[in-house]
Image: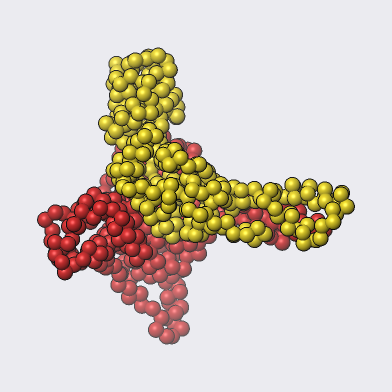
Amino acid sequence: MPPASQNPEHNAEEILLAFAAAVRAAGVKVTADRSRSFVDAVRRLALDRRSDVFWAGRATLCASPEDLPAYQRTFEAWFAVEHSAAQRLETSATTVSAAALDNDDGGPEGGREQLRALASRRELLRHRDVAILDDTERALLHRLFEELPVRLPTRQTRRKHLDRHGDVDRVRTLRDQLRRGGEPGPLRRARAPRKPRRMVWLVDISGSMAPYADSLLRLAHRVVEAAPRQVEVFTLGTRLTRVTGALRVPDPDNALALAGRAVPDWSGGTRLGEVLRAFNDRWGQRVMVRGAVVVIASDGWERGDPALLGRQAERLHHLARRIIWANPHRGKAGYQPLQRGIRAVLPHVDFFIGGHSMQSFEELLDVVANA
Amino acid sequence: MTQTSISSATALAEMLAATGYLADEGLATIGYLALSMERPLLLEGEPGTGKTSLAEALAEAFGLPLIRLQCYEGIDAAQALYDWDFTAQILHLRSVEASGGAGLSVAELESSLYDKRFLLARPILKALQQSPAVLLIDEIDRADDEFEAFLLEVLSTYQVSIPEFGTVKADTPPIVVLTSNRTRDLHDALKRRCLYHWIDHPGLAREVEIVRTRLPQVPALLAEQVVRVVQQIRVTDDVLKPPGVAETLDWARALHQLGRAELDLESAAASIGALCKYREDTERVSAALSRMLG
């Protein structure tokens, strides 16, 4: 007997589908066909065992280890022994509401003057430090992000495609002749196209970076938008959080809100070395980093051991193709790389650039594209 | 499914145990579901947690051939599915020419070119032809998007059509095991087609059991000591690559080869290469060993 059928009004299938919906609400991407597979899987197992329902759900509804904690929590909430089925069905899914930002950027409501004023404001804004903007300017800045041109670093692929301007492809030419029964024909040319190179963005969200973190994540969002499958984004604080999934949401404000909820340690302390080590341990031995362009956005304010930070940067440098360090203070007048953290990583960084204004973001994207 | 039908997850766990593979409840349940629903099994987990060896154990348990496809960046259908041996085809053409056409019409000649003997069956086609079989698609995350899309097509229908040759369809779908080290996210469509399971490192008791099962010649005391040390190394976060079960087995085997009945500092230091694959790790683990065993 399923735990659900204590109440005959709700048949087992309804309960299971509602549970799948609850798992979806908990943040796991459950699609309709996944729910169907789940119901099908449970049917094939003994329905009276809680663990069977658990494993069937885990195999059909989850798609990555990140999904597992949310799944586990939902399962325990749902199939706790004392819950009645009716109660469970009423535990309706909490909907994710996005905290949309108010924007009253005084858009052009007609009139050339206003347009011109707006254009010059934009030009001024491009050079302003994003840390010292008021709300109106910030809203306008967010618009500017949407216009940022993103070009991605590329790599040579190994597989060839037909291309009129490529080199002569011996195999294709011969095979072509074979189709003609061995008669010579036109030469077939092929070349291996270039593809976007993988990229990893590590954004420092500790207290000292608070004025910049939002803008840097918006920048990362733009890059994710340009190549959702090639870019991974993590936040660095007291711990490492993967926010790629959140930033794949098309609308930047929603994406930022979602990322904000995923990150438990906004504006906390930072132990860059330790967090970077966690990153290296967890993701370093994987294809994600190997040959990738790694962008680290941080002021290098390290409270931990700079030697550890140096070692971890070196490890990352062995794997990555390029490490680009964007430091918000770098672009300001009179900056000297004096922090111990920065000094420790500089030998292992290919590019050391700013990241405090729209213009410096554009430069950063430029460096990234050519990395 | 005839040869691969089983009655329950417990039955599957027993069959796997008979081959020396100890599956926990979750893995056995999901394996059973995969067989019963005829869906591919997608296994993710740290390296060395027994993803690949599950496919080997399944093949052994059901007495089926194991066909392995190792993925790499840039793998395409020609390496995974089939290819025409066109040097042999050219040779064939030339020999027909040399023998003065041998009275073949053009159509006959052409169809003789696409004979089965010129078809190079790559792993996936092989698996479809020989099915029932176990098809292991290893490290799918190394392949790229196009390959995934192609794979999805094959795994949904278990058939491929070769334009010059015809359609090859598996009479019974092969048991398909995909493994991934999570170097990148797989396409959702492919994941939806599969049953998903994340394999963790085993606990102490289970790992000891694994060592005892796989290496019956190793004395119980040594097995337990080795597993204890390995488990400890896994929880201290200072190693670049946490050792998997494969490394545990290697190390236990190495120590046994050295003729040790117990773990001591000297033999551990001598055989550390079986456990650690990075110079930095070797140093750290050696230091940790002297603390544990000193």
For the residue pair B53 and B49, the one nearer the viewer reads as B53
Rendered image coloring scheme? by chain
Q: Number of numbered discs present?
A: 0
For the residue pair A293 and A185, the one nearer the viewer reads as A185
Q: Is residue B72 visible?
A: yes
For the residue pair A305 and A246, the one nearer the viewer reads as A246
From this viewpoint, which residue is outermost toward the bottom? A110
User: In the rendered image, which quarter contains the C terminus of chain B?
Assistant: top left
The residue sitting at 59% across, 47% down in the picture is B122
* Residue A59 x/y as whole percent: 33, 52
* Residue A266 x/y as whole percent: 27, 53
Which picture quadrant has residue A195?
bottom right
* Residue A14 x/y as whole percent: 24, 66
The residue sitting at 40% across, 70% down in the picture is A143
The residue sitting at 74% across, 47% down in the picture is B88
From this viewpoint, which residue is outermost toward the left? A82
Question: Is B293 on the left or on the right of A184, as rendered?
Answer: left
Which picture quadrant has residue A111?
bottom left
Where B248 falls versus A74 (above or below)? above
Q: Which chain is yellow?
A: B
Q: Is residue A306 visible?
A: no
Question: Is A365 on the left or on the right of B46, as rendered?
Answer: right
Question: Is B95 on the left or on the right of B7, as rendered?
Answer: right
The residue sitting at 33% across, 41% down in the picture is B13
Chain A drawn colour:
red
* Residue A100 x/y as whole percent: 30, 69
From this viewpoint, which residue is outermost toward the front? B2
Which picture quadrant has residue A129?
bottom left
